[in-house]
Amino acid sequence: MREKLTHIDEDGRVNMVDISAKPQTSRVAIAAGRVRMKKETLALVGSAMVKKGDVITIAEIAGILGAKRTSDLIPLCHPLPITGVKIDIDMDEALPGLVVRAQVKTTGQTGVEMEALTAVSTACLTIYDMLKAADKSMVIEAVELIEKSGGKSGHYKKSGGG
C-alpha cells in the first residue's frame, strides 16, 4: 500500500498541511546522530584544548537553537510552541566520536520529529565546525528518528533501539 504524501495536494501541488482541525496533544520526538572523528580529535574534546571553546556545551546550545528555528529552515514545517528541548552529547571511544541525542516536546496540533532531527543535525554541524581545524575528515552519520509519541499516527519506536 502506498502512503499519501501530506505535503502534496490532490492536484500534485505542494501545500502546507492544514492542521487547524487537529486536536492539541502532548507530543515528543527523540532523534540521534553521530560525528565520527579521529581518536586524536576526540581526545581534544575531552581535554578542553579546542581554541573555539567547550565543544559539547556549544553544540548542545546550537541543537536547542536548531530545534527552535526548524520552521525557518524547513519550508513546510509549522512554527510550533516548543515546551522542552534536551540535547545530550556523549563521547564514544569505540566510535570514535560524539553521539548526539535530542528530545523535543510540545503540546500542539502537529509533531516535533523535524525539530528533533534539526536539533541533532545542528549540533552535529556545530561539532564539525568547532573541530574542523583539527580533523576535516570527520563524518556526520546516522541522523535518524528514534522515537515519537502523540498525535493521530500514535507511537513509533525504531526497531533495534538507537
Image (cartoon, rainbow, N blue to C red):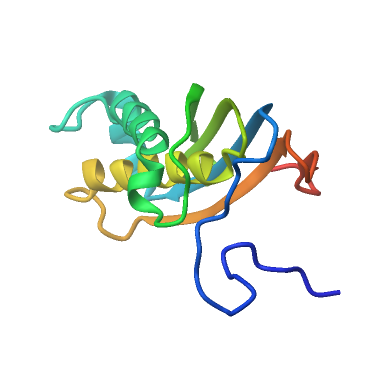
| Position above or below: 17 against 90 | below
Return the x and y of residue 156 as percentages of the image width and height: 77, 43
Residue 145 or residue 138, whichever sits in front: 145
| Picture residue at 60% right of the left edge, 44% below the top | 19
| Picture residue at 57% right of the left edge, 26% below the top | 106
- Can you say which quadrant of the picture contains the N terminus? bottom right
* Residue 97 falls in image quadrant: top left
Residue 100 is at least partly visible in this image: yes
Q: Is residue 12 left or right of residue 141?
A: right
| Position above or below: 8 against 149 | below
- Can you say which quadrant of the picture contains the C terminus? top right
Residue 93 is at least partly visible in this image: no
Return the x and y of residue 36 as percentages of the image width and height: 44, 51
The outermost residue toward the right is 1
Return the x and y of residue 22 as percentages of the image width and height: 68, 39
| Position above or below: 33 against 9 | above
| Picture residue at 52% right of the left edge, 46% below the top | 114
| Picture residue at 61% right of the left edge, 40% below the top | 110
